[in-house]
Amino acid sequence: MKSTRKGLRDGDLIKDTYERLNCANCDQVLKKENDPDEVFSVRICPECGARFKELR
């Protein structure tokens, strides 16, 4: 699982005009999944299921 920063650098993620993270393949806004026991949250594309971790 890549981080969101690495996904932005590699071109897997793009930001829209409102600074939301979008999947570059599907052009869908990523959903956020928070686990209170982890240091990071997981960003998931609702269409293709790509997962990226994001430090809080």
Image (spheres, rainbow, N blue to C red):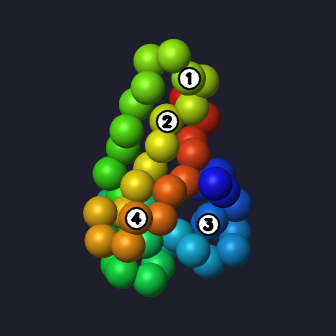
Q: Which residue is mark 3?
A: 8
Per the model, the C-alpha gap separating discs 1 and 4 is: 20 Å
Residue 5 is at least partly visible in this image: no
Per the model, the C-alpha gap separating discs 1 and 3 is: 22 Å
In contact (CB < 8 Å): disc 3 and disc 2 = no
Camera-side mark, 1 or 3:
1
Q: Which residue is mark 4?
A: 49
Residue 42 is at least partly visible in this image: yes
Kind of residue sitting beneath label 2: Ser
Question: Few, some or many C-alpha atoms within 10 Å of disc 1 (few <14, some 14-19, many ≥20)?
Answer: few
Q: Secondary structure at mark 3?
A: helix
Per the model, the C-alpha gap separating discs 1 and 2 is: 7 Å
Question: Few, some or many C-alpha atoms within 10 Å of disc 3 (few <14, some 14-19, many ≥20)?
Answer: some
Instruction: Pick whichever of labels 3 and 4 is earlier in the sequence.
Output: 3
Per the model, the C-alpha gap separating discs 2 and 4 is: 15 Å
Q: Secondary structure at mark 1?
A: loop
Q: Which residue is mark 2?
A: 41
Q: Residue at x 48, y 43 (%)?
A: 42
Q: Residue at x 44, y 50 (%)?
A: 43
Q: Quadrant of the C terminus?
A: top right
